[in-house]
Image (cartoon, grey):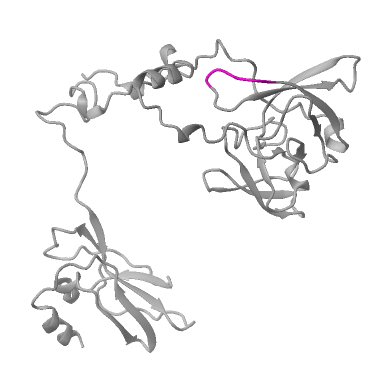
Amino acid sequence: MGRVIRAQRRSHAIFKSHTRLNKAPARLRPLDYAERNGYIRGVVKEIVHDSGRGAPLARVVFRDPYRYKLRTETFIATEGLHTGAFVYAGKKATLSVGNILPVGQLPEGTIICNVEEKVGDRGALARTSGNYATVIGHTPDDNKTRVRLPSGAKKTISGSARATVGIVAGGGRIDKPLLKAGRAYHKFKAKRYNWPRTRGVAMNPVDHPHGGGNHQVRHSTRPTVLLGLTLYYSTSEKLPPLQGTLFLVKKSVLLLPAEPVCCAVPSRSRRHNLVSPNLVPFLFTLYFRCITFHQCQFMVFIRFPIIPVDPLESTLAHQCE
């Protein structure tokens, strides 16, 4: 029986986050009456570094709306924030960098960060240094807002979810290379035990599925390409039932199949990847023409890399015509 590999040990104690030096959880204020209906003002008391985090944190002091006391909150600092600056949080706060508003109140194109994924979760999206999300649209009827995340993905969230206006401070952190192992050691020492990371091919067979062998080889296959024709309709009519056998071939570039691999083709799609057995000999030559099939015009082209011209190319092209 094999060893318990690294991926299976990930839930154990040595892989837990190193939190001893963390200042405080970086979260928005708890959602209360003041933020839902008006606004509340706070003042930035200090900007602090949080161990293991690329972005600086801001300590913001608010007056407690219900008791005679002050409440200190720890926010992720936005670029341009400074000590002594006022931060306004609430539905009626102004559109300024550092302020916290519901995303439904922000115009399209606004740059935001520390966005709530669900109403009241106090910030979950776009929180790392230099990152930001963008408001790209609203649906007032459903109280929904669509935002573009730092990954480029688009996500629909509630219009009542809050966000901070601006981008997270500390941008450009990864532009400077680490250059040496010592810096990487200290960087990850503050985060968690995930450095150095041994490659699977450098292990023994008992430690990893890629381990073993007399050489370290890359576990990759030959490049594959989809062999077929792409047919685009030039009419809006429905596709009539196709006659004959249609094939979809996916094989290595260097290993042409002796016989095409049969695959079902949907009959109602407006785009098909098709290949016929009589086209297999010259699949790698770029051939472009317009054909008529069942009284519908199709633009036909072959989406493959062009290789050196085969001596039979001209003969095959003539036969096809």
Q: Quadrant of the N terminus?
A: top left
Asked whether 48 falls inside the magenta stretch, the response is: yes
Residue occupying the point 42% across, 70% down: 269
User: Is 69 left or right of 127, judged from the image as shown?
Assistant: right
Q: Residue at (60%, 37%) from the top-left corner?
A: 126
Please tell me in which quadrant of the rendered image residue 248 appears: bottom left
Q: Which residues are magenta?
A: 47-52
Q: Position of residue 154 (x, y in %)?
A: 57, 49
- Predominant SS of the magenta segment: loop
Asked if residue 193 is among those painted magenta in the image, a careful observer would answer no
- Give whichever of 160, 263 is nearer the camera: 160
Q: Looking at the picture, does residue 149 appear above or below residue 198?
A: below
- Is 76 displayed left or right of 302 in the figure? right
Relative to 54, residue 17 above or below:
above
In the rendered view, tell whether residue 250 sits above or below residue 312: above
Q: Tell me the quarter of the image containing the C terminus.
A: bottom left
